[in-house]
Image (tube, rainbow, N blue to C red):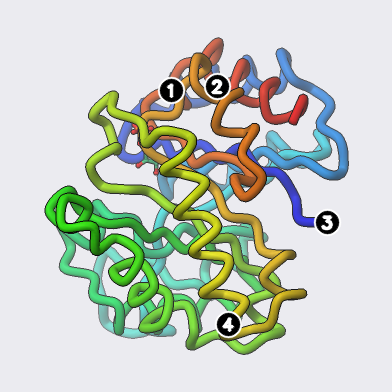
Amino acid sequence: MRKKIAAANWKMNLTWQQGNELVQALLGATPSIQDSHQVILSVPFPYLASVNSMVQSTSGYQVAAQNCHHLAAGAYTGEVSAIMLASLGIPYCLVGHSERREYNGETNAVLAEKLQRCSENSIRPIFCCGEPLTIRDQEQQNEYVARQLQESLFVLSKEQVGHAVVAYEPIWAIGTGRTASSAQAQAMHQHIRKVLADHYGQELAERIPILYGGSVKASNADELFGCPDVDGALVGGASLVASEFTAIVRSLCKS
Ligand code: 13P
């Protein structure tokens, strides 16, 4: 069975003091996570090593980087490679968040390279996809998301994709307070699983966790996690508040 995952994405928020307190509060409030579930904290680069060691002794908790460079190494001042992340023992990395696509011009082709760099270094990618509002208004979201998968994720072999996680984050729902309805989320997740099954086979598609992201909060988590193809959430704003994220983790653990 695929894992159920609650992933936090802190984005560019919190000082180290605030982040440290937040991690301690989370570990204190939800110390034991069953094997079938996982909590992933996607924290800014400078905090990765410390948070990684803070969660080592608590089963069910992992860390993720929020990005990595698409090349292995070289004269790219300020960048961070997948090799560096692997050398710190970082198990996961977000790839293709819509904010990076928009503000850093990351194309499907560049994201395919990032996915390869992650896989070569045994880092599990959390591949983000999702459509803007204009595409949703034209009812073209299924084709749009299928293309993001085809042009980026499908660079991975069957074996590699078995370690990946997909996160569906409709751009119109990110940071807007406007969550996709559970019916909209389920429909897209089912579609994504079918696109994965058509390419990689049904058995593999059934094993890949598909997370929903976009204004997930404690108050809507139960309903989203009740959808058969929603295997968890990628949470932005609500992951910065210990009580909110703890409640989301508890919701996940019940599902
Ligand atoms: P919000 O939960 O703040 O809408 O952000 C979602 C997101 O972008 C997670 O990666």
Q: Distance between the residues labelled 2 and 3?
A: 24 Å
- N-terminal of the two: label 2 or label 1? 1
> Three-letter amino acid code at disc 3?
Met
Q: Are marks 2 and 1 in contact (CB under 8 Å)?
A: yes
Q: In what quadrant of the picture does the C terminus appear?
A: top right
Place of residue 168 in the rendered image (x, y in percent of width and height, measured from the top left): 43, 53
Q: Do the residues labelled 1 and 4 touch (CB within 8 Å)?
A: no
Q: Can residue 51 be seen in this view?
A: no
Place of residue 116 in the rendered image (x, y in percent of width and height, measured from the top left): 50, 83
Q: Distance between the residues labelled 2 and 1?
A: 6 Å
Which residue occupies 72% across, 39% down?
61
> Three-letter amino acid code at disc 1?
Ala
Ligand 1 image position (quadrant): top left
Q: Name the residue under label 1.
A: 238
Q: Name the residue under label 3.
A: 1
The image quadrant of residue 118 is bottom right
- N-terminal of the two: label 2 or label 4? 4
Q: Mark 2 points at which residue?
A: 245
Q: Do the residues labelled 3 and 4 touch (CB within 8 Å)?
A: no
Q: What secondary structure is marked by label 3?
A: loop
Q: How far apart are marks 3 and 4 (CA)?
A: 19 Å
Q: In this view, does 49 lie to the left or right of 170?
A: right
Which residue occupies 20% across, 53% down?
132
Which residue occupies 23% across, 29% down?
176
> Three-letter amino acid code at disc 4?
Asp
Place of residue 99 in the rendered image (x, y in percent of width and height, measured from the top left): 24, 52
Q: Which of marks 1 and 3 is in front?
A: 3
Q: Which of marks 3 and 4 is in front?
A: 4
Q: Distance between the residues labelled 1 and 4?
A: 34 Å
Is the residue marked 1 within 8 Å of ligand 1, measured from its CB? Answer: yes
Q: Which numbered circle lies on residue 198? A: 4
- Please, is residue 156 above or below residue 226 in the view? below
